[in-house]
Amino acid sequence: MGERDVRSEVPARLAVQCAPSTRIQEFVVEILVAAGTDPAPAQSVAAAITGASLRGIDSHGLRLLLHYAKVVRSGRINPSPKLSFQRTGPSTGIADADNGFGHFASFFAIERGIELAKQSGISAVSVINSSHFGAAGAYVLHAANEGYAALGVSNSDSFVLAHGSVYPFHGTNPLAFAAPNYEGKPYLVDMATSAVTWNKVQDLIARGLPLPEDVSVDKLGEQTTDPTLSAALLPLGGMQFGFKGAALASMIEVLSAVMTGSPHCSQIPGMPGPDLSSHRRMGHLFVVIDPNRFVSAEVYRSGMRAYLHDLRNQESKSAIGVMAPGDREWAIEEARLRLGIPIPDQLRRELDGLADCLMVRRLD
Amino acid sequence: MGERDVRSEVPARLAVQCAPSTRIQEFVVEILVAAGTDPAPAQSVAAAITGASLRGIDSHGLRLLLHYAKVVRSGRINPSPKLSFQRTGPSTGIADADNGFGHFASFFAIERGIELAKQSGISAVSVINSSHFGAAGAYVLHAANEGYAALGVSNSDSFVLAHGSVYPFHGTNPLAFAAPNYEGKPYLVDMATSAVTWNKVQDLIARGLPLPEDVSVDKLGEQTTDPTLSAALLPLGGMQFGFKGAALASMIEVLSAVMTGSPHCSQIPGMPGPDLSSHRRMGHLFVVIDPNRFVSAEVYRSGMRAYLHDLRNQESKSAIGVMAPGDREWAIEEARLRLGIPIPDQLRRELDGLADCLMVRRLD
């Protein structure tokens, strides 16, 4: 998610006030519990939000707390979900989110997936009756930290053109993949299948800057670099090669909606409303693989080491050099664990207002 | 693979001579057997080549026969592989290609994967000691025709820049995904993670046409639209958003090389040589999923129908409208089953020469 120039991101963000991640995690729980959420789902959301903020995925970090606090009070989210798991085969199962937060159900599902993969080598667990699950990376990272490779996908409501369409159809349909890396933080891919995120558009509006070419269209389906006119995103690959990004979004739609029996993109109530009280019934799918069913621990370790070494040491004209997937995220996490998570003034004011309204101690 | 404008492709190809797919399949077997290959692997290669040609994936169709006939005689490919399968868990196993054709081992592996998924709901089968397996779609399609969803990946030798690198590093690293569609041909995604294929570059050189912007670089890593100067491909997303295409290529590298204990991209002898006698020891990975562990057949069927209907009926400014993944391939297959597979003059001359050399009846 987001762009990859660490240097241009960090200093800009350091100009704003920061808060320690531990305090943010606590604050998210306090806000969600004050809004009526049970402690367990509140803790899952807090872990996912804080992790995303730490890794620099600000689109799916602390800013989402405003949205989550709203939708748990408006009825969209069941504040007291009773999660259930139906095992449907030696290596498969269905986790029912009971219309609670997607984060809570997704941590639950990946735990079940790890248990099944431990027994059989690979597992697939679907999540049904769910809602937005934040950054997809959180759940596959959990598996990687336990020694498993994992793939996680979800669709969303319509934000992105189908290749050749005028209006948005697919969601930003993220794909996350993580795998153990015994010589550093886990290997991590966590990306939307659009070229940029919707949040990037909002960010550029706020800063009065234009969009890059070939990433967005206006309400008539014409390309625009004016973020205030942006009505939809283009799939990865843009106007000419977007059939590939759209194919990835479509594959994720099949895996997370058709395969799970959940509504597809255009059938899901829009994340920002106007309907904030209906359950969204979103689906996700997680696949967990035990690498040791294919290679010994030592061969895996040395293979990952050799691959990442060769990748990172490719000749580059950029001062940053070539990064492996996840390198940017872990560099930002290291900085933010040290310096705190930057909170833009506008976000802080909104969080202060939310805290006051819910009679919770402010963040600072 | 390839671009998606059916109308611009078919008439151009129809101007050249065509051959029936049944004859092509027979001819491929005859050539490979005359080159020393056992009948069983020759038949697998012929099925994969003919299927790719039928679906319009000409980069991985009949033209590859020239290459395959060369490498089986030069020693790279074991002409008489003894395939073996080691089951490593209830849902996992390793297929050893014995350095034969990747197509033979991949059909074998997906068959084992289907058997395991039938029992447990999902399976993963790696292929080791393999070589080029052609178009990845062949194997996952086989699973979809049996009622299973499947994902297949392979790396290759270096053709594509890492994001920010000067020289090629990753392979074109294809991803194929197929799923049953009970109201038509299977749902199919089959794509390289570069914006264009290397064959597209060769094709434009032959036709004296420029490359699109932002898909290729010269030997100094500078963007070029001159196909004669092209030394490497850019990952999907181009110079600016290629970190996403590169992340997909990297994920596929981890799945097909690190996870299988096989060499990674830059360690694999180049497909075109100069070394044509060493085994390439390539890895692939196939995941097979039983949709009926997650939804009833009826819910799956109606979900796929509703999703594809909504996708194909998105408003479009293009006369072609919006196509679902696979629609282009199946439209070309329908036409080519009727009219034959077009064979450019140059390719036909080369195939005639090969047939004469191996004392096999020419194609026509």
Image: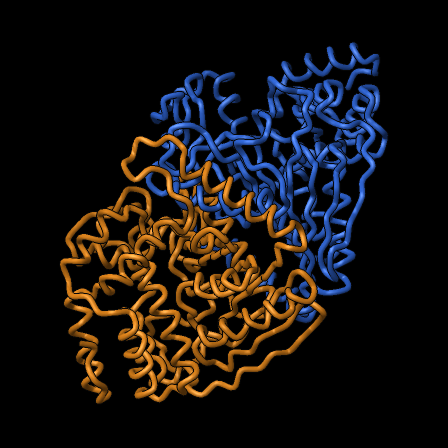
Chain colours: A blue, B orange
Q: Which residue is at a point 44% across and 73% down the rendered structure image?
A: B103
Can residue A320 be seen here?
no
- Quarter of the image with the C terminus of chain A is top right
Circle count: 0
Q: Is residue A321 above or below residue A282?
A: below
Q: Is residue A335 above or below residue B352?
A: above
- Quarter of the image with the N terminus of chain A is top right
Q: Quadrant of residue A288?
A: bottom right
Q: Position of residue B168 (x, y in %)?
A: 39, 57
* Residue at the far right in the pictured view: A39
Residue nearest the viewer, comparing A55 with B147: B147
Q: Which residue is at a point 66% across and 34% down the rendered structure image?
A: A281
Q: Which residue is at a point 20% across and 47% down the rendered structure image?
A: B210
Q: Quadrant of residue B311?
A: top left
Q: Position of residue B244 (x, y in %)?
A: 48, 44
Residue nearest the viewer, comparing B142 with B352: B142
Can residue B134 be seen here?
yes
Residue nearest the viewer, comparing A221 with B73: A221
Q: Position of residue B293 (x, y in %)?
A: 67, 55
Residue nearest the viewer, comparing B160 with A256: A256
Q: Which residue is at a point 44% across and 22% down the rendered structure image?
A: A231
Give the side of residue B345 with respect to residue B6, left or right: left
Q: Position of residue B54 (x, y in %)?
A: 32, 62
Q: Is residue A77 above or below residue B206?
A: above
